C-alpha cells in the first residue's frame, strides 16, 4: 500500500511569505461627480485588501492616474465636469495606462458600447445598477486581466 498523500511541513518563513503574496492590496481609482454614486462605489468595493482612491471630476482622475498610479482597476462615470470620462480614458490609453476600466453611465446611446469597446480592456455598466451587478462587472474585468 502506497501513501499518495505526502505531508509537507512548512517553515514559519515560508508561511509568512505565502501569506504576504496572497495579501497584496488591489488599487482602484474611482471617479464620479455624484457624491452618492462615489459613496456607493466605495462601500460596495471596499475591504481591507483594496485601496480606493477617489476623484470627483475628469481633471482629478487624470491627476490621480498620473501621480498615484499604477492602479489595478479604473472606474469612471462618463459625464463629469472638467473632462468627460471617455476623454480621460483616451488620454490614459495614450499614456500606456493599461488597467482595466469600468465605465459607468446613465446616458443612453447605442454607440456608447462601441466607444467603450475601442478603449480596450473596458466594460460598460449602465445606471441604475445594483451592488451585485457592479461586483460582477468588476470580477469580469479582473478575470480578463488575469487571463491576459
Image: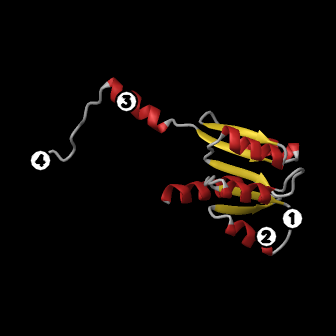
Left or right of residue 24: residue 32: right
Q: Which of marks 1 and 2 is nearer the N terminus?
A: 1
2 or 4: tag closer to the N-terminus: 4
Distance from Cα at disc 1 to Cα at disc 4: 65 Å
- Please report whichever mark, 1 or 3, sits nearer to the chain's N-terminal start: 3
Residue denoted by label 1: 107
Q: Determine whether 80 is above or below 115 in the image.
A: above
Mark 4 sits on what residue?
2
Residue at the spot of label 2? 112
Q: Residue furthest top?
A: 12
Q: Is mark 3 on a helix, strand or loop?
A: helix
Per the image, the residue denoted by label 3 is 15
Residue occupying the point 72% across, 51% down? 75
Q: Is residue 89 left or right of residue 142?
A: right
Tell me whether circle 3 and circle 4 mark residues in contact (CB < 8 Å).
no
Q: Earlier in the sequence, mark 3 or mark 4?
A: 4
Colour scheme used in the picture? secondary structure
Taking the view exactly as shown, the residue that stands out farthest to the bottom is 110
| Dot 1: element | loop
Residue 26: image quadrant is top right
CA distance for labels 1 and 2: 9 Å
Mark 3 and mark 2: span between their CA atoms? 47 Å
Amino acid at each position: 500500500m502506497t501513501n499518495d498523500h505526502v505531508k509537507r511541513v512548512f517553515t514559519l518563513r515560508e508561511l509568512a511569505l505565502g501569506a504576504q503574496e496572497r495579501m497584496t492590496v488591489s488599487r482602484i481609482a474611482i471617479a464620479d461627480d455624484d457624491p452618492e454614486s462615489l459613496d456607493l462605489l466605495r462601500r460596495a468595493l471596499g475591504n481591507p485588501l483594496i485601496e480606493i482612491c477617489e476623484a470627483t471630476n475628469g481633471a482629478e482622475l487624470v491627476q490621480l492616474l498620473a501621480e498615484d498610479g499604477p492602479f489595478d482597476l479604473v472606474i469612471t462615470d462618463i459625464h463629469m465636469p472638467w473632462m468627460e470620462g471617455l476623454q480621460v480614458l483616451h488620454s490614459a490609453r495614450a499614456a500606456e495606462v493599461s488597467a482595466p476600466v469600468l465605465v459607468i453611465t446613465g446616458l443612453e446611446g447605442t454607440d456608447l458600447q462601441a466607444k467603450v469597446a475601442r478603449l480596450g480592456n473596458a466594460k460598460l455598466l449602465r445606471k441604475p445598477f445594483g451592488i451585485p451587478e457592479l461586483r460582477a462587472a468588476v470580477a469580469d474585468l479582473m478575470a480578463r486581466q488575469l487571463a491576459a
